[in-house]
Image (tube, rainbow, N blue to C red):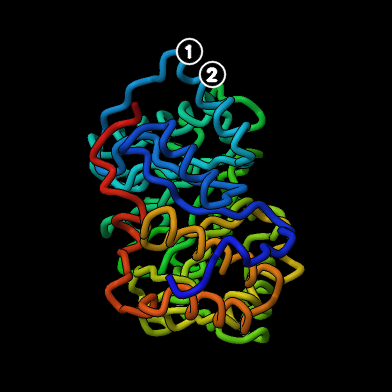
Amino acid sequence: MQVETSTIPIPPLTRPLGRHIGTGPGMSQAIAQAKEIGCTAAQIFPGNPKGWRHTPLPPERATAGRLGWAEAGVAPLTIHAPYLINLASPDDNLYANSTQGVRNSLSRGVELGAPFVTVHLGSHKGTGPEAGAARLIAATHAALEGMPDWLYLLLENNVGAGNSMGNTLDALGNLVRDAAHPHIGVCIDTAHLWGAGYDLTTAEGVDRAVSEIDRAIGLQHVRVLHINDSPMGLDSHRDQHTYLGQGNIGYEGLAAVLTHPGLAGIPAILETPDGGPEEELIRLRTAALLSAGDAEGARAYQEAALPTGSDESGTVPGDDTDGSDSGTAALP
């Protein structure tokens, strides 16, 4: 470390801000890490992000989890559904597992008081967008059946590769409208927008992108932001995340996203590589400076505190690890 981070004031936050926290070491450790680095929001997996196994939490542990996140000042906590899920799959076995996987994730949200569950949209595997949409919408309705009114399932935008569902903002908006469910919303990921061809490097570009989100989907449906930089080129259709300011979107663009009035107050989650508590405190303070519109201050602070932070090895596949641990252990 090149600067004493404890002496750097955190700008007043205008939105809940945090990062994805790995729960492999245990829920209490995840809560402690979130508190240590200054999260006022956080995201976790419901268990193994690359497996189907789901074990409900015993009531006393669910209560302890809810109280622990609340006492840490994390609100909202969000859940990211496992990566194996494909709600548009033509394979009946995968489709059934995916529907149950979303329901399991929603159930974890109920247990922990997490109001948002984000899910990747998957692929129609060549059967066509209409067939995929019909299956996806039926699955979301089935998964949400009987869930509490305060719980929302969020469909995440993607980079528009291959046969992916919701591969444009218009297509994602159509899914939300056709689902016509009051508890289906949207999560917007900046690295995914960039990969799909939306230039976020300037305030003007961000304004155009936000206007497109409003036109195609409706900003009232956007409940969570994933704030990630990308090492990939614009319109690459590649999903890779890297540290804020260290990719091709850059400090100015991310500051423009975080200060755009159309996105005001929406919880923001980082899904960048997890370097441990000391480093993540700096990354989160960098995000706080960006949220205050201080792009140059964020650049100067991060580069002084982490002079090796521009190492290009600091990337993660957005559809693989999302900056968490390996996720091989289920929730304790």
Answer with left or right where residue 261 lies relative to residue 121. Answer: right
Three-letter amino acid code at disc 1? Pro
Residue 300, horizontal then vertical, whole percent: 56, 82
Image quarter (top left, top right, bottom left or bottom right) of the N terminus: bottom left
Amino acid type for the residue under numbered disc 2: Thr
Secondary structure found at label 2: helix
Residue at (65% x, 77% y) in the render? 256
Q: Could you tell me residue 330's position as x and y percent?
A: 29, 32
- As drawn, the label of residue 59 is 1
The reply to whether residue 181 is in sight is: no
Q: Position of residue 257 (x, y in %)?
A: 63, 72
Mark pair 2, 1: CA separation: 6 Å
Q: What residue do we see at 48% from left, 32% from top? A: 106
Q: Residues within 10 Å of mark 2 (few under 14, many from 20)?
A: some
Q: Which residue is mark 2?
A: 63
Q: Quadrant of residue 29?
A: top left
Marks 2 and 1 in Cβ contact (< 8 Å): yes
